[in-house]
């Protein structure tokens, strides 16, 4: 199995479909990291167990950062009511 040093992950709220996309430096997708967002709606959904995580990318940190930004920009996350993200990367 090929090694990786970063991931891009996504959460989707199972109730309303809202999404959060993030980047995390790790070589273990099960390291316990959740997200760094301070968004209270996202935190509440997490606390209620309503978020489902998907790993969107595993690889280099440089590529992961680029992918996160491209995904957020494509979805215009900072202006969209479909995202919890407050910025486009």
Image: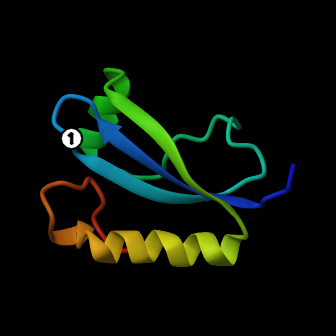
Give the residue drawn at x 36%, y 32%: 51
x, y (%) of residue 1? Answer: 87, 48
* Kind of element beneath mark 1: loop
1 left or right, relative to 48: right
46 left or right, relative to 59: left
Image quadrant in which the C terminus is located? bottom left
Give the residue drawn at x 77%, y 61%: 5
80 left or right, relative to 42: left
Whether residue 15 is situated above or below residue 35 in the rendered picture: above
Q: Residue furthest top?
A: 48
Residue assigned mark 1: 17
Give the residue drawn at x 69%, y 60%: 6
x, y (%) of residue 48? Answer: 31, 21
x, y (%) of residue 87? Answer: 31, 71
- The mark total stands at 1
Give the residue drawn at x 60%, y 69%: 64
According to the image, what is the colour scheme of the structure? Answer: rainbow
Residue closer to the observer: 84 or 58: 58
Whether residue 24 is situated above or below residue 19 in the rendered picture: below
For label 1, the crowd category at 10 Å Cα-Cα, with few meaning under 14, some 14 to 19 and many 20 or more, is few
Q: Quadrant of residue 86?
A: bottom left
Q: Quadrant of residue 23?
A: bottom right
51 left or right, relative to 61: left
Whether residue 79 is situated above or below residue 57 in the rendered picture: below
Q: Residue furthest front?
A: 1
């Amino acid at each position: 199995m090929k090694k990786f040093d970063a991931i891009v992950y996504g959460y989707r709220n199972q109730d309303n479909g809202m999404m959060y996309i993030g980047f995390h430096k790790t070589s273990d997708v099960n390291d316990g990291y959740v997200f760094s967002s301070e968004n209270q709606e996202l935190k509440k959904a997490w606390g209620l167990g309503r978020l489902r995580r998907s790993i969107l990318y595993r690889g280099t940190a440089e590529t992961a950062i680029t992918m996160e930004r491209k995904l957020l920009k494509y979805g215009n996350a900072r202006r969209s009511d479909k995202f919890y993200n407050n910025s486009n990367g």
